[in-house]
Amino acid sequence: MTRTYSVVLLREPDGGYSVSVPAVRGCHTMGDDVPEALANAREALELHLECLAAHGDPIPEEGELVSVRMWDAREASIYKITVAVPVVTQGEQVSAVA
């Protein structure tokens, strides 16, 4: 199974991008440019979801609205990333199912 999440890229005043996934609390990363930031976002999101599943926590679903706090950022962009949702069967290791 897969899920699609919005990822928010904020251009930082000193360069590069900070990245967050609003639907997945605590899922953040960075990148020097947009392609790197998106690649890092995918990796961070996949690892975060695997960690949640391994601990038996629910996998968040994205709501209809995305909220962005820009602070001192010059610009914000929102992208969609689709990732495999990890599935845990009792007594087994985490595995991703596409």
Image (cartoon, grey):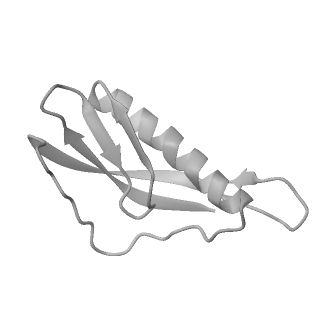
Q: Is residue 54 above or below residue 38?
A: below
The residue positioned farthest toward the right in the image shown: 91
* Number of residue marks: 0
Image check: 74 left or right of 3? left
Residue at 24 percent of width and 28 percent of height:
16
Location of residue 6 in the rendering, given as x and y in whole percent from the top left corner? 35, 57
Location of residue 42 in the rendering, given as x and y in whole percent from the top left corner? 48, 42
Location of residue 48 in the rendering, given as x and y in whole percent from the top left corner? 56, 51
Residue at 10 percent of width and 44 percent of height:
72
Residue at 18 percent of width and 57 percent of height:
69
Image check: 8 left or right of 27? left
The residue positioned farthest toward the bottom in the image shown: 64
Tell me the quadrant of the picture where the N terminus can be found: bottom right
Can residue 65 be seen in the rendering of this structure? yes
Q: Is residue 94 above or below residue 17?
A: below
Location of residue 87 in the rendering, given as x and y in whole percent from the top left corner? 73, 62
Q: Residue 19, located in which quarter of the rendered image?
A: top left
Image check: 94 left or right of 12? right
Can residue 85 be seen in the rendering of this structure? no
Residue at 27 percent of width and 26 percent of height:
33
Tell me the quadrant of the picture where the C terminus can be found: bottom right
Frontmost residue, 7 versus 3:
7
Q: Is residue 70 above or below residue 32?
A: below
Q: Residue 53, located in which quarter of the rendered image?
A: bottom right
Frontmost residue, 11 versus 78:
11
Image check: 9 left or right of 61? left
Q: Is residue 37 above or below residue 84?
A: above
